[in-house]
Image (cartoon, rainbow, N blue to C red):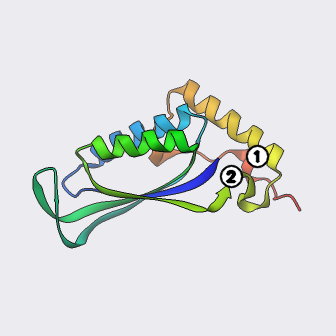
């Protein structure tokens, strides 16, 4: 599964609770398809380069989010559909990062990494915390030394 980076602009008037709700919805889609949430960054509210019309309103500011997912292309289509239909999202852009995959990140042993990711996904889905993007714990198995 390839690594994708999504940069999204959300309404500046959206509260942190609204943003968490959006990220929860998207992360459940990713984790439900055996994907991995690699990173979620909130860049805060910033002025837009130009006045933008979205959902019958003009916007001059937006909250920028950067999301990194290791997910299948079919699940990515569902994520993009969800972002497109959500009224909190003004714009988004998806970039596939150079044919990279989770197996090539950091030089870790591919077999150990695959097992650790599957265990993490299962535990997060069972705990019901699949969408808590702001408090996503790191797996101790992934903190081991990279394979040489």
Mark 2 residue element: helix
Residue 18 is situated, as x and y percent measured from the top left of the image, at: 28, 43
Q: Which residue is mark 2?
A: 102
Q: Residue at x 40, y 46 (%)?
A: 80
Horizontal placement of 82 versus 129: left or right?
left
51 to the left or right of 3: left
Residue 112 sits in which quadrant?
Answer: top right
- For the residue pair 147 and 5, the one nearer the viewer reads as 5
Disc on the earlier residue, 1 or 2: 2
Residue at the (50%, 27%) spot, across then down? 128
The crowding category of the residue bearing disc 1, from other C-alpha atoms within 10 Å (few below 14, some 14 to 19, many at least 20), is some
The numbered mark at residue 89 is none
| 39 shown above or below 72 | below
Give left or right: position of 56 versus 65.
Answer: left
Q: Is disc 2 surrounded by few (<14), some (14 to 19) or many (20+) residues within 10 Å?
A: many
Give 6 or 47, whichever is nearer the viewer.
Answer: 6
Residue that appears at 47% across and 40% down: 27
Q: Which residue is mark 1?
A: 113
Quadrant holding the C terminus: bottom right
């Amino acid at each position: 599964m390839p690594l994708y980076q999504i940069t999204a602009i959300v309404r500046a008037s959206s509260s942190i609770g609204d943003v968490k709700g959006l990220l929860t919805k998207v992360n459940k889609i990713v984790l439900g398809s055996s994907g991995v949430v690699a990173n979620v960054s909130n860049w805060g509210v910033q002025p837009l380069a130009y006045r933008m019309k979205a959902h019958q309103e003009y916007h001059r500011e937006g909250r920028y989010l950067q999301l990194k997912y290791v997910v299948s292309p079919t699940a990515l289509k569902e994520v993009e559909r969800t972002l497109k239909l959500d009224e909190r999202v003004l714009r988004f852009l998806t970039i596939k990062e150079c044919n990279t995959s989770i197996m090539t990140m950091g030089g870790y042993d591919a077999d150990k990494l695959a097992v650790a990711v599957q265990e993490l996904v299962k535990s997060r889905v069972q705990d019901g915390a699949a969408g808590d993007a702001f408090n996503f714990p790191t797996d101790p198995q992934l903190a081991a030394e990279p394979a040489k």
